[in-house]
Image (cartoon, rainbow, N blue to C red):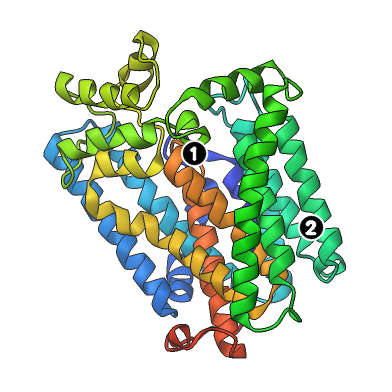
Amino acid sequence: MIAAIVGLGMAWSLYVNGGVTIGHCVLLAMGPVALTAAWGQKSGRLCLCLLTLWLLTAAATELVVHDPLGHTVYALCRPITVALSFCGAMWAFQQRGRVKNIYVVSLVVGLAGGIAFVPTPGLSADPWKYGFGPVASVAAALVVATPPLRDRRWLSALAMLTVALLNLELGFRSEFLILFVAAVVGLLASRRGSGPVFRRCVLLSAALCALGTVVYVGYGHVADSGRLGAQQEMKWEVQSRVEGGLLLGARPEFIASTAVIEDSPLVGRGVAPQVSVQTRSAFLDRMQAIGVTVHEGITRYYFGRGMFLHSVLFQVWAETGVLALPGLLFPVGLVLWALAAAVRSGSGSPALIFSLLAGQLGWDLLFSPWPRLEGVYLGTAAAAAVVYLASQRQSGTVPPSAQRIPSKVNV
């Protein structure tokens, strides 16, 4: 019952901008239990310590820059929601199979409900891209990981590729690429009879390089021909002219944001700070240097209401300071570590899930603004990685460097 309440509680937010939900309040009420579950792992303790450092750094920055109360609460909610989601998921994933399944299903329903019930910027313009798409991707990966499909590699890969093509048809290009890569990683990682681990890793690396080339060339040809619609054709035409190609054409602020960071790399500016004319000019000059036409609309988009860098990583760095980055990056690092362990052990379903999570979190980290429920994704994914690594250590299928971490979890 508690697992269902926590998962479904993510559908209703008490503080919308900060992503604080009823589910987080339930986790706060059961704090000692959830904290004990997370503290039992060395990597869990390290994650909580880094999130605490992020919280203290955010509090210090807000005090120094004299931000208003609303901005201060928003800055503090980011690490708090990640920590609460992490502790709650650590507790749920260490319970019996039935409790874990109830938690996962209710969490997916809660995430979808949170998008449907709470207004989100951009949702009315494109509900799939700005709302339901990522939730549907995670749900598809979890369905593929169920026993009926787990051992049917080609059927699982076909199901994931079908969802990927649906994203492409609906104009969600980044989600298409993430799902496509996850399907390939899950398919190749499950090849237990393909020889030593090194050979499997070489095969996987070669396949991903070939996949990147084929997707880039194939998508460019199809988009340029207009078969993906006028909007995709126009986007491809603009991005192809930008120096650096498709990636920088889609997210030029990834490069230009360094101008804002260089101005104050150690101490944050606070939430939605006013940027000096010199820093703003340096930002726009770097946009123009890579081929992006700078006009008044771009200036308003990035600096019309303080500062909007369209990147979780750079936004948090610029607002809160460099000491917040370890707490932000470590959960993603845990997911990548779990992905490597899944590939090493030849586990197709975990490799698919952690590949999807790593791609989703990594893309949002670099190229997307902070979503309302980002703390739920970060904390839950990190907890899943920690529990999976603990189970792999118990079965002796993790590299020796990972086996040195003691485990008190019965998975």
Instruction: In the rendered view, tell whether residue 331 sits above or below residue 189.
Output: above
Examine the rendering and report whether any part of residue 128 can be seen. no
Give the alpha-carbon distance from disc 1 to disc 2, as whole Å: 30 Å
User: What residue is shown with label 1?
Assistant: 372
Left/right of residue 274 with respect to residue 103 in the rendered view:
left
Instruction: In the rendered view, tell whether residue 210 sits above or below residue 262.
Output: below
Q: Please tell me in which quadrant of the rendered image residue 384 appears.
A: bottom right
Examine the rendering and report whether any part of residue 216 can be seen. yes
Left/right of residue 405 with respect to residue 221 in the rendered view:
left
Q: Residue at x 74, y 71 (%)?
A: 98
Label tally = 2
Question: Which amino acid type is marked by label 2?
Answer: Ala
Left/right of residue 239 with respect to residue 173 in the rendered view:
left
Q: Position of residue 351 (x, y in %)?
A: 65, 66
User: What residue is shown with label 2?
Assistant: 157
Q: Please tell me in which quadrant of the rendered image residue 192 appears.
A: bottom right
Question: Which amino acid type is marked by label 1?
Answer: Arg
Q: Position of residue 214 (x, y in %)?
A: 67, 45
For the residue carrying disc 1, how many other residues have a C-alpha within 10 Å: few (<14), some (14-19), or many (20+)? many
| Label 1 with label 2: CB-CB less than 8 Å | no
Q: Residue at x 51, y 72 (%)?
A: 386
Q: Position of residue 176 (x, y in %)?
A: 67, 42
Considering depth in this image, is 338 or 218 the residue closer to the camera?
A: 218
Q: Residue at x 68, y 77 (%)?
A: 346
Considering depth in this image, is 232 or 42 the residue closer to the camera?
A: 232
For the residue carrying disc 2, how many other residues have a C-alpha within 10 Å: few (<14), some (14-19), or many (20+)? many
Q: Earlier in the sequence, mark 1 or mark 2?
A: 2
